[in-house]
Image: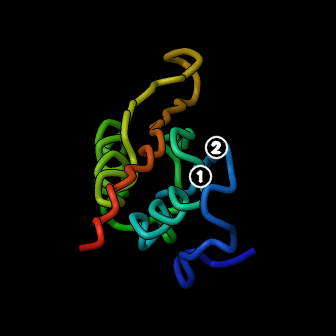
């Protein structure tokens, strides 16, 4: 267990995992792009990351921008975090709320960009 706001580095090898999830906690990260970059580092190319959230949070712990946005704004913010991390593609926003009368459930899903191999420079 570790505080990702203090140490966003993950203690795992590169490309160690087939997928990951962040469940109703992205709103508490003070360096979300750094954490998302690290998650990308430990995932295999093409692996999925699912970030789920609802319309609830602990206001004393959530970052201010999260508190100022609505649900659509939360999804946009997460999409921008993923873009800033620089290792994500195929970002998709989902509404998985069971019904209008129930508590909402949203997700932003992204895939780890494939590794791009650069050609080696030829020796003269």
Q: Residue at the spot x=43%, y=65% of the render?
A: 32
Does 61 appear above or below 94? below
Which x, y percent locates residue 87? 39, 54
Left or right, residue 81 beside residue 2:
left
Give above or below for 6 relative to 99.
below
Q: Residue at x 54, y 84 (%)?
A: 6
Residue 85: name its quadrant: bottom left
Q: Is residue 100 left or right of 88 when viewed as pictured? A: right
Report the residue at 63% width, 47% height from top: 20
Residue that label 2 marks: 19
- Whether residues under marks 1 and 2 lie with C-beta atoms below 8 angstroms apart, the answer is yes
Query: For the point 54% across and 23% down, which residue is it?
Result: 97
For disc 1, the marked residue is 43
Element at badge 1?
strand
Where residue 89 appears, x then y in whole percent?
Answer: 37, 40
- Front-most of residues 114 and 4: 114
């Amino acid at each position: 267990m570790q505080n990702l706001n203090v140490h966003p580095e993950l203690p795992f090898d590169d490309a160690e995992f087939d997928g990951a999830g962040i469940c109703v906690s992205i709103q508490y990260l003070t360096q979300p792009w750094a954490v998302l970059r690290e998650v990308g580092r430990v995932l295999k190319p093409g692996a999925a990351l699912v970030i789920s959230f609802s319309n609830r949070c602990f206001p004393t712990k959530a970052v201010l921008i999260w508190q100022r946005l609505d649900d659509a704004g939360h999804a946009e913010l997460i999409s921008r975090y993923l873009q800033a991390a620089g290792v994500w593609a195929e970002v998709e926003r989902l509404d998985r709320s069971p019904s209008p009368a129930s508590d909402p459930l949203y997700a932003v899903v992204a895939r780890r960009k494939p590794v791009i191999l650069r050609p080696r420079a030829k020796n003269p």
